[in-house]
Amino acid sequence: MSASLSAFGNLVAFRHSVFALPFALQGAWLASGGPPPWRSVAWIVLCAVSARTAAMGFNRFLDRRIDARNPRTAKRELPAGVLSVAQVVGLIVISSAVFLGASWALSPLCGKLAPLVLVVLFFYSFTKRFTFLAHGFLGLALGIAPPAAWLAVRGSLEGDWIAPLVLGVAVLCWVAGFDLIYACQDREFDAAEGLHSIPARFGAKAALTLARGLHVVTVALLCVVWQRAELGWIYLAAIGFAAALMAWEHRLVSPTDLSRVNLAFFTLNGWVGVGLFCGLVLDRAFLA
């Protein structure tokens, strides 16, 4: 049983829920002007984790034959036979059902919009088959989190949407940027397989340059959130911390040396969201 749970966890990279979850929680804190009701927080966490699990499971299911042909991904759970197609489909169905149920528990409006969220999340997995803008669709999939959590706490479409929407666009740019870095590893394979990505079409140098630009835009948008939400110096310091991590991330990779992509992609990006969320919580707690 523990081996199976570990395999499922590795399949969906469960530990990487840290990418989207802190931004969803920021949306909740912005909606309430401080700590939201803990019941709402619990349902939001369940929604974020279950939606991501369903999306990652679907991605691994859809890409299983491609992954089997790629030396970098051939040892993933489906192509390696550690998990069966039936098991992964079951995970997708259960995770989707949990997400839909948790969304209805938040509010009827969230419940009605939840299927549309799943459509967006699942659609991303098809995009590299027809557009090099797939990185932006991944960013959109995660960028939904802040405004969705804001809506979950507010319970209606009324109110000032600017801060959560700008935060969502910041997440989109941030995710698209680090996905460009990650995709550089597969540029030759993608080109040979007829898959679409910016590194495969324009090369690693152009992809890394665009990634840097997207992360500069990310920092600028976070400053807009800081100003619009009337936050203080603590959140501004958190933005500085995030900017430093992104700058470090770009120093770790180059078109001719991608050996430290995992450190840049997984470790540093995980701390970006956590640092910003902690900054928002502390700012609201001590400076509001």
Image (cartoon, rainbow, N blue to C red):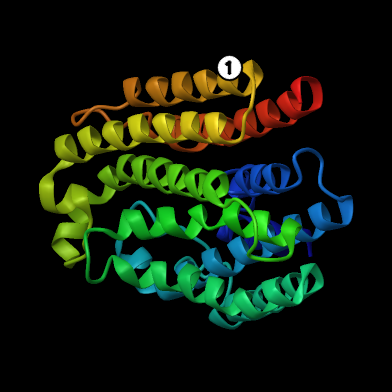
Q: Say whether residue 218 is left or right of residue 11.
A: left
Q: In this view, does 196 lie to the left or right of 68?
A: left
Q: Residue at left 82%, top 40%? A: 35
- Tell which of 162 and 171 is nearer to you: 162
Residue 173 screen position, x and y as percent: 38, 44
- x and y percentages locating residue 72 in the rendered image: 35, 51
Q: On screen, 263 above or below 181? A: above
Which amino acid type is marked by label 1? Ala
Q: Would you place residue 171 above or below residue 74 in this image?
A: above
Front residue (pair 80, 11): 11
Q: Mark 1 points at which residue?
A: 237
The residue most toward the left is 202
The number of callouts visible is 1
Residue 59 at what x, y percent from top left? Answer: 46, 68
Which residue is farthest front? 159
Q: Residue at x 66, y 60 (%)?
A: 151
Q: Quadrant of the C terminus?
A: top right
Q: Residue at x 61, y 59 (%)?
A: 148
- Indicate the quadrant where residue 248 lies: top left
Instruction: Tell me the element at label 1.
Output: helix
Residue 89: x and y, percent?
58, 80
Q: Is residue 37 left or right of residue 77?
A: right
Q: Quadrant of the N terminus?
A: bottom right
Camera-nearest residue between 37 and 24: 37
> For the point 79% across and 61% down, which residue is it?
43
10 Å crowding of disc 1: few (<14), some (14-19), many (20+): some
